[in-house]
Image (cartoon, rainbow, N blue to C red):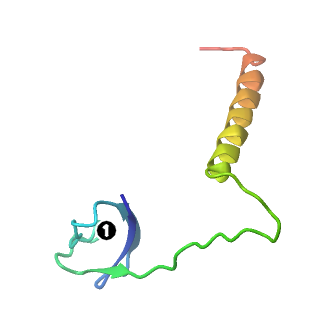
Amino acid sequence: MPLYSYRCGLCGHIFDEFHSIKEVRTDCLECGDKNGLQRVIQEFLNLKKQDGEKKEVGSLVKNYIEETKREIDEEKEKLSKQEYNP
C-alpha cells in the first residue's frame, strides 16, 4: 500500500497514512474537520547507482535487517548482565 501525506485546510495538521489507492481520506485526525484534508504532493525517492557500483536487489533491506539484528543482540547482552529487581 502506498504512503500518502495529508494536510488539514482548517488546522494545518500534517500526517502520513498508508491506504489503498482507491481510498481517500477526508476527515482531519487532529481537529475532526470534515472534508478539509488535501493530499500533499511528495517527491519520489530515486536511488541511482554510483559508477561501477553493483548492487543486488534488496541489498538496502538486507543491510538494514543485519544492522537491526546486531543492535538487538547487543541490547540482549546488555540486559542479560543487569540484575532484575521487581
The residue nearer to you, when weighing 24 against 59, is: 59
Numbered marks: total: 1
Q: Position of residue 44 (x, y in %)?
A: 52, 75
Label 1: which secondary element? loop
Residue sitting at 66 percent across and 52 percent down?
A: 60
Residue at label 1? 30
> Mark 1: which amino acid?
Glu
Q: Position of residue 49 (x, y in %)?
A: 73, 68
Q: Residue furthest right?
A: 52
Q: Is residue 47 left or right of residue 31?
A: right
Q: Is residue 20 left or right of residue 86?
A: left
Q: Does 36 sit above or below residue 24?
A: below
Can you tell which quarter of the image residue 71 is in?
A: top right
Q: Position of residue 20 (x, y in %)?
A: 28, 61
The residue nearer to you, when weighing 21 against 9, is: 21
Placement of the N terminus among the 4 image quadrants? bottom left
Can you tell which quarter of the image residue 22 is in?
A: bottom left
Q: Does 50 sit above or below residue 68?
A: below
Q: Does 69 sit above or below residue 14?
A: above
Mark 1 burial class by Cα count in 10 Å: few <14, some 14-19, many 20+: few
